[in-house]
């Protein structure tokens, strides 16, 4: 349940290219942290290092420490599979498994690792997860229909249900609303507010209003120029970042002067 | 008189391109159907005399059905052996190339597998007959000694190794590149999004393949196996060279059995009159088997349409 994340001086590479440099950040449990910044500044790349999804890309590697309640994710003998089952991720585009029913999608993560689950337990978990993702009332009569038949916003909530079904400690969201309409976006934002009660949530967003609406703390990333590594410029209470930033670059960005 | 501004004279060249293209596509589609139809008609007309002939005059002397069913069974057995071996191996190799092998190995390996498809079947036949068959003889003897109680492996084993099992193995090697290269292409097309979804849930690489890759590739795998089956059913030269033919017997390690394609190839040069008609009728039967198999495969694929991700 809801663990804290501490990152110490993390460098992120694509093969030899340094994409993100020297990030140190402390993320409190049961809080929502937003990463904002211009395109290409490395915020999504950095997010993916928090559950070791970065190394799925050929050549992807990191230097430094990421601690989950004090345990180093990149420590010797740590299996990325274990890491990912404790730190879930929701992607930019909704990606339910197209060949699975809504119910099977929710259970997809639970059934991994050869876990057996009784039918009644499975039904309970499906209902609980879908309720947790505010989707239950919309899909309860068609659990056996394919997940790909839902609308984009519903699919994204199905992906969130799938993520919380494995009971992670942390949920990472990579621009979860960028492919959705305003109504669906609102539904997801409400959901993020509720998820905060049980999970640590980290969200990357391009939408500054969204960051202001949903997050407790905000981290601003920036890049000096193309080919240069992205850096964490400022990390503070969301209200401070938007009303009284310490750095000039942050102020320029949140006030819309660039980016 | 008012003129409608929307009835423009522009873009007529674009319209022309549209017309030419749709015409060409339609012509190609019709050509395929006409060809198929012509083949079917040819087979039917040429085969007709067999069905109306006096049963005593047909080879074997007991009518066409008695003549054809043992070689139909033989054809199916040979193809079944080939697919039983080639499907798991082919899918395994394809998965290795697409998801496990380091890039430096994957490229050349895929290329080598594709080359296997370019070797003429007579070479496979010669290899099966000169190298594989003698090599397999000790294995057949072991099978007949230890598993001889199963009718499939009933002894005494062939001393030349020119048996149904050898022919099936040669066919498997020939079918392997078809299944491998088609399914590899499909495995590579799995959306990254779905693979990452599985990994982010804590899937191991194999679990990711089970939840994201295989379900996505399922219709493609079935098509690949069906194409392989098509080749195995119709393969002539390799079987004709490898198999020492005879009557239909259950044992796969004794001399015997025959397939339709090899039966036609071996007898066609000297056939005339009713015998020729018989062989063409055998071809018609093979044509129908292939058609049936493809219809079944289509059925399997479309039954899962709702979950194919195409919606």
Image (cartoon, helix red, strand yellow):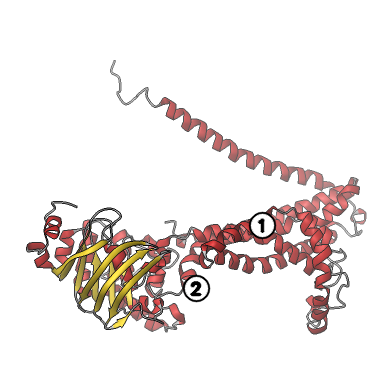
> Seen in the image, is A246 located left or right of residue A63?
left
Q: Are marks 2 and 1 on the same chain?
A: yes
Helix, strand or loop at label 2? It is helix
Badge count? 2
**Chain bearing mark 1:** B
From the image, tell me which residue sits under label 2. B206
The image position of residue B109, as x and y in percent, is 60, 61
Q: Quadrant of the C terminus of chain B?
A: bottom left
> Seen in the image, is B144 located left or right of residue A140?
right
What label sits on residue B292 in the rendered view?
Answer: 1
Within 10 Å of disc 2 (Cα), the crowding (few <14, some 14-19, many 20+) is: few
Q: Quadrant of the N terminus of chain B?
A: top left
Cα distance in 3D space between marks 2 and 1: 34 Å
Can residue B239 be seen in the rendering of this structure?
A: no
**Chain bearing mark 2:** B
Quadrant in the picture for residue A208: bottom left
Residue drawn where x is 80% and y is 59% of the image:
B125
Q: Is residue B310 above or below residue A27?
A: above
The image position of residue A33, as x and y in percent, is 20, 70
């Amino acid at each position: 349940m809801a663990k804290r994340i501490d990152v110490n001086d993390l460098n992120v590479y694509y093969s030899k290219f340094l994409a993100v440099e020297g990030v140190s950040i402390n993320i409190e449990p049961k809080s929502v942290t937003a990463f904002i910044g211009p395109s290409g500044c490395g915020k999504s790349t950095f997010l993916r290092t928090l559950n070791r999804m970065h190394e799925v890309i050929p050549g992807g590697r990191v230097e430094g420490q990421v601690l989950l309640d004090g345990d180093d994710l990149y420590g010797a003998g740590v299996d990325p599979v274990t890491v990912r089952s404790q730190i879930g991720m929701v992607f930019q585009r909704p990606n339910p498994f197209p060949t699975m029913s809504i119910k099977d999608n929710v259970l997809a993560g639970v059934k991994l690792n050869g876990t057996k689950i009784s039918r009644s337990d499975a039904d309970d978990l499906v209902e609980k997860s879908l309720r947790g993702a505010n989707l239950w009332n919309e899909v309860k009569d068609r659990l056996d229909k394919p997940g790909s038949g839902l609308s984009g916003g519903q699919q994204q909530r199905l992906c969130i249900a799938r993520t919380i079904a494995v009971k992670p400690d942390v949920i990472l969201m990579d621009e979860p609303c960028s492919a959705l309409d305003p109504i669906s976006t609102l539904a997801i934002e409400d959901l993020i507010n509720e998820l905060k009660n049980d999970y640590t949530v980290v969200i990357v967003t391009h939408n500054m209003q969204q960051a202001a609406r949903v997050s407790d703390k905000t981290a601003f990333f920036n890049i000096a120029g193309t080919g240069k590594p992205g850096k964490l410029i400022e990390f503070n209470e969301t209200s401070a970042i938007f009303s009284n930033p310490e750095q000039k670059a942050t102020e320029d960005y949140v006030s819309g002067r660039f980016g | 008189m008012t003129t409608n501004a929307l009835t423009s004279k522009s873009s007529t060249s674009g319209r022309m391109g549209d017309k030419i293209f749709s015409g060409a596509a339609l012509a190609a589609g019709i050509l395929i159907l006409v060809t198929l139809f012509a083949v079917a008609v040819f087979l039917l007309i040429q085969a007709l005399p067999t069905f109306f002939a006096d049963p005593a005059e047909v080879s074997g002397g007991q009518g066409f059905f008695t003549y054809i069913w043992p070689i139909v069974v033989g054809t199916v057995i040979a193809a079944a052996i080939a697919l039983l071996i080639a499907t798991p191996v082919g899918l395994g190799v394809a998965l290795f190339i697409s998801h496990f092998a380091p890039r430096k190995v994957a490229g050349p390996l895929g290329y080598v597998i594709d080359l296997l498809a370019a070797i003429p079947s007579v070479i496979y036949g010669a290899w099966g007959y000169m190298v594989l068959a003698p090599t397999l003889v000790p294995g057949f003897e072991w099978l007949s000694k230890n598993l001889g109680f199963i009718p499939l492996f009933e002894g005494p084993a062939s001393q030349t190794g020119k048996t149904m099992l050898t022919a099936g193995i040669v066919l498997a090697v020939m079918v392997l590149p078809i299944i491998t290269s088609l399914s590899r292409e499909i495995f590579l097309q799995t959306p990254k999004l779905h693979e990452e979804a599985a990994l982010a849930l804590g899937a191991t690489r194999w679990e990711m393949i089970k939840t994201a890759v295989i379900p996505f590739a399922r219709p493609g795998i079935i098509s690949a196996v069906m194409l392989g089956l098509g080749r195995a059913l119709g393969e002539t030269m390799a079987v004709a060279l490898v198999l020492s033919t005879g009557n239909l017997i259950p044992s796969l390690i004794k001399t015997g059995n025959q397939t339709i394609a090899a039966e036609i190839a071996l007898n066609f040069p000297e056939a005339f009159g009713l015998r020729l008609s018989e062989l063409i009728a055998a071809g018609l039967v093979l044509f129908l088997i292939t058609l049936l198999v493809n219809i079944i495969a289509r059925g399997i694929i479309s039954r899962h349409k709702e979950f194919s991700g195409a919606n």
